[in-house]
């Protein structure tokens, strides 16, 4: 998929294909890094691996936001949505900086607090923007993008608010 969208970028020269290719690569690295132990292999430390893997989620958000804005041509077609995309991208960058600072300070509790609350706040804000896009959408493409992206941002919110109690699970998520 990455090579297909990247080849579209080289032939058509539309930035949304480049952004989507980058998004696919970042998502692949995040998922495979956890699943196949790539982070542990590269960093040789489970502690650093976890911090890096969680940081990839925020990088993934930033790249997806750029794809979204480019695909919808939000700067021209939906100025408020474009503004919201910019705000969310800056917030993701600020969160990445905070994660880096907390890592240097070895503040695991702060890291967990920041990441858990950041996911909820960013995703809720994104869903509000997507609801607005559904309201002001000018063409079917806007509705399709809003619905598809809503699923992307709603899943972590559902997980956050409907996850099992902590007493049912140990730290790494396996059932006790």
Image: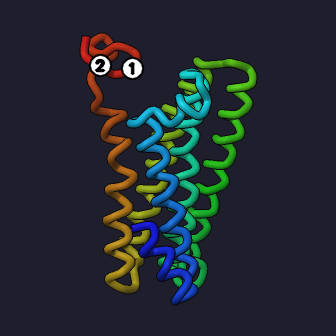
Callout 1: SS = loop
Determine which of the numbered discs, if any, sits on residue 172 in the image: 1
Disc 2 secondary structure class: loop
Tell me the residue that label 2 is attached to: 174
- CB under 8 Å between callouts 1 and 2? yes
* Near-viewer residue (162 or 67): 67
Binning the other alpha carbons within 10 Å of mark 1 as few (below 14), some (14 to 19) or many (20 upward) gives few
Colour convention: rainbow
> Would residue 92 be found to the left or right of residue 134 on screen?
right
Where residue 32 appears, as percent x and y from the top left, is 42, 43
- Indicate the quadrant where residue 52 lies: top right
Q: Is residue 30 visible?
A: yes
Quadrant into which the N terminus falls: bottom left
**Label 2 environment density (alpha carbons within 10 Å; few <14, some 14–19, many ≥20):** few
Residue 41, x across and y down, in percent? 54, 31
Q: Residue at x 46, y 60 (%)?
A: 24
Mark pair 1, 2: CA separation: 6 Å
Label of residue 155 in the image: none
159 left or right of 45 in image:
left
Rendered location of residue 89, percent (x, y)? 62, 56
Residue 60 versus residue 11: which sits nearer the camera?
Answer: 11
Q: Left or right of 61: which side holds 92?
A: right
Q: Is residue 66 above or below residue 90?
A: below
Residue at 35 percent across and 58 percent down: it is 150
């Amino acid at each position: 998929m990455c090579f297909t969208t990247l080849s579209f970028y080289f032939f058509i020269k539309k930035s949304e294909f480049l952004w989507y290719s980058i998004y696919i690569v970042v998502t692949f690295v995040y998922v495979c890094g956890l699943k196949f132990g790539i982070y542990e292999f590269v960093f040789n430390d489970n502690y650093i691996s976890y911090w890096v893997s969680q940081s990839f989620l925020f990088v993934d958000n930033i790249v997806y936001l750029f794809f979204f804005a480019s695909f919808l041509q939000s700067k021209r077609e939906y100025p408020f949505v474009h503004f919201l995309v910019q705000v969310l991208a800056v917030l993701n960058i600020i969160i990445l900086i905070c994660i880096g600072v907390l890592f240097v300070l070895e503040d695991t509790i702060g890291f967990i607090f920041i990441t858990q609350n950041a996911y909820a706040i960013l995703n809720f804000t994104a869903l509000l923007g997507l609801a607005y896009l559904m309201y002001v959408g000018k063409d079917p493409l806007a509705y399709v993008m809003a619905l598809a992206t809503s699923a992307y941002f709603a899943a972590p919110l559902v997980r956050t608010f409907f996850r099992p109690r902590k007493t049912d699970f140990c730290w790494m998520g396996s059932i006790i």
